[in-house]
Amino acid sequence: MPGFSQTTIIAGGNAGPSIALVLSLLIAMATLNGCDSSASEAQEEAGANSSLKELVDELQKLPDLEQKTAERLAKHILSSPREDAVKLSDAIRAVKAFPRGSRDENRPVPIAASLATEGDISVYYKTNATLEVDKDADIVARVNGLVKKITVEEGDEVETGAVLLEIENDEYKHRVTLSSARAQNLKSKRDRLEALTDDLVSAQERETAESEYNTAMAELELAKLNLSYTMVRAPFAGRIVTRMVDPGQKVGSETPVFHLSDFRSLLAKVFVPSKEFRNLKTEQDVNLVLDSTKTVMKGGIKLISPIIDPATGTIKITVEVSDYPANTRPGDFAEVQVITDTHPAVVLVPRFAVITDHDEQVVFIATEGNTAERRPVEVGYTDDDNAEIISGVKVGERVVVKGQRRLENGTVLKILDNTSKDPKVSQDAPESQKKKPGPKGFRKK
């Protein structure tokens, strides 16, 4: 039949089951075109529209047939006389009966395959948070005076107790000297009174001398403390973020002189639903994905609030990240993935290898004979990369990861990308299952 022979031949390449479905529809439509005229025109129009949609859907399943071409072909078939539809049916029967050993029928379908592996897979509670430093403070002067010397600059790393700044201390040294002399004089007075007999000195005089001496000693200690405050020190280890004063500048008590932050670890404070409380514990693993670079960092739960916020029904947890990229800074936005459950040593396949076909989850296996085998599977946990296969696939089997939507059971395959010849072990698998690399330059024979 003119206009259809080319399409029919294309359809015969690798779509036997689809041709059978089209054949059934064509016979039904041929019957529709030749049905008894006693049926109402409305019924005929409704049936034709339904047949058109079904025929377009089936024609689109044929290889190399675009939607517009399928619609045009379907309309032409429905508008054809009964005898033309019968001729087309005969032509498709001839294509279906074409020998399977022909060149077109056995043309391999190009695909990519990957091996099913064994490893761990986890489920997460995901939320967002802003990274913060563990310790952060403004360092203030404790005494009044002129800045004599600045020993650190912005960006410097300092240890606990390191001197950051010196204040002129001559006045405070003299105060220590005066307080020390006064305390010494009062000590001598107290000792003389203690040496005298009760007939010469009263108990009240002894008590007064003792009290004056103790007061003088307290003043001496206070003078020494103020002298020590002329050396401004770091209360914790960290990095100087901001210097707020200059040499020669006068500072007073409580004047901020530096801003110090501890960058050795970063914190993310997040709020999770109270129903997840039973799945949380300190030092539990947490993944953090930086929003700017998509870098994945490993962290752990440092603190869990003992109470539930009644207003939001959430629990506050603090996640600590000790190892992070050098370009990560406080204020970075990150997705926090709290691991709530893990299935160890399970069968894993790439997540996109699993497709849904007629309300059934399936994968296609590349057999040893390079043919496709359709396998219904039961899927467990999934993450961004992998899917857990509870049943249907074994470790080491080749799973089709690209091109599977063009396959049927028994389709001949041409494997363009076979990611491995040996079963891989997931990066989340126990260390005992991971292969250790040999020394540099070592080649395994």
Image (tube, rainbow, N blue to C red):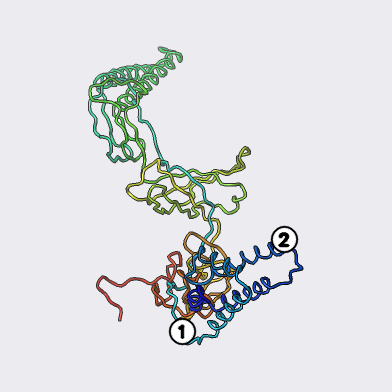
Point 65% across, 74% down: residue: 30
Give me the disc on residue 140. none
Give me the disc on residue 369. 1
- Type of amino acid at the residue the image marks with label 2: Ala
| Upstream in sequence: badge 2 or badge 1 | 2
Point 35% across, 30% down: residue: 139
Q: Position of residue 119 (x, y in %)?
A: 48, 68
| The C terminus: image quadrant | bottom left
Q: Against 96, is 216 above or below?
A: above
Q: Against 223, is 58 above or below?
A: below
Q: Position of residue 228 (x, y in %)?
A: 31, 28
For label 2, the SS is helix
Q: Position of residue 85 (x, y in %)?
A: 60, 75
Q: CA distance from mark 2 to mark 1?
A: 53 Å
The crowding category of the residue bearing disc 2, from other C-alpha atoms within 10 Å (few below 14, some 14 to 19, many at least 20), is few
Kindly indicate whether the residue at mark 1 contacts the one at mark 2 (C-beta within 8 angstroms).
no
How many numbered markers are drawn? Answer: 2
- Type of amino acid at the residue the image marks with label 1: Gly
Point 52% across, 78% down: residue: 373
Side (left or right) of 411 relative to 326:
right
Q: Does residue 360 appear in the picture of this structure?
A: no
Closer to us: 208 or 155 = 155
Give me the disc on residue 42. 2
Point 36% across, 43% down: residue: 329
For label 1, the SS is loop
As drawn, the residue found furthest toward the right would be 38
Closer to viewer: mark 2 or mark 1: 2
